[in-house]
Amino acid sequence: LDWDNFQNPKPANATLAYNYQMRRDYSAFNMSASSVNSRCALAREKLLGDVSDCFLAEHTIPFVETPMFLLQSTVDAWQLENVLGETKDTGIVNKFREVTTSKLFNALAGARGSGQRLGAFVDSCVHHGGGWKEL
């Protein structure tokens, strides 16, 4: 998952503001409410929110009906460099991990409370999209 974690505009050292980039891609790819989860889009429209939020996993997962099992690091290597813009300062990285962990566990708890079939393997190792055999 690529969480809509940190402030927009982006931190000074980050290469991009991920949430802004994803919303820009939504527009650039000529997407519409029919391009994302329809239940998510309807909920965002009712709240007068931005339907492009449904392009972000954080917002659409609660509406997915298919059982899911997520593999996620709370310190995703790609996010550290590209979203946070920092990999060396342990204080900043640990704050990032705390925010990510909190958001992830809140999302999982909300899914369980809604009856959604969602499981996860969550680790705190620095990697991105793989390396599961090495953990």
Image (cartoon, rainbow, N blue to C red):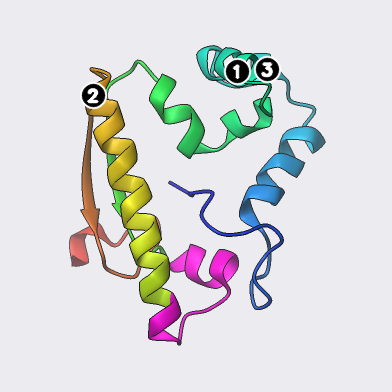
The answer to if 123 sits in the magenta stretch is no
Q: Given contact means CB atoms under 8 Å apart, are the residues at marks 3 and 2 in contact? A: no
Tell me the magenta residue range: 77-92
The residue located at (76%, 43%) in the rendering is 24
- Residue 115 - label: none
Tag 2: residue type?
Gly
* Mark 2 lies on residue: 113
Task: Residue 94: tell me if it is visible.
Answer: yes
Picture coordinates of residue 102, whole percent (x, y): 32, 52
Q: Position of residue 79 (x, y in %)?
A: 50, 63
Which of the two residues, 30 or 101, is positioned nearer the viewer here? 101
Q: Report helix, strand or loop for mark 3.
A: helix
For marks 1 and 3, the one nearer the N-term is 3
**Crowding near the residue tagged with mark 1, few <14, some 14–19, many ≥20 C-alpha atoms within 10 Å:** many
Q: Residue furthest bottom?
A: 88
- Above or below, 123 against 108 in this view is below
Query: Which residue is disc 3 drawn over?
Result: 33
Whole-angstrom CA distance, mark 3 to mark 2, is: 26 Å
Distance between mark 1 and mark 3 Cα atoms: 6 Å
What is the total number of numbered labels drawn onto the structure image? 3
Q: Is residue 85 magenta?
A: yes
Could you tell which of marks 3 and 2 lies nearer the N-terminus?
A: 3
Q: Are marks 1 and 3 in contact (CB under 8 Å)?
A: yes
Which dot marks residue 41? 1
Relative horizontal placement of residue 130, taking residue 120 as reference (left or right): right
98 shown above or below 122:
below
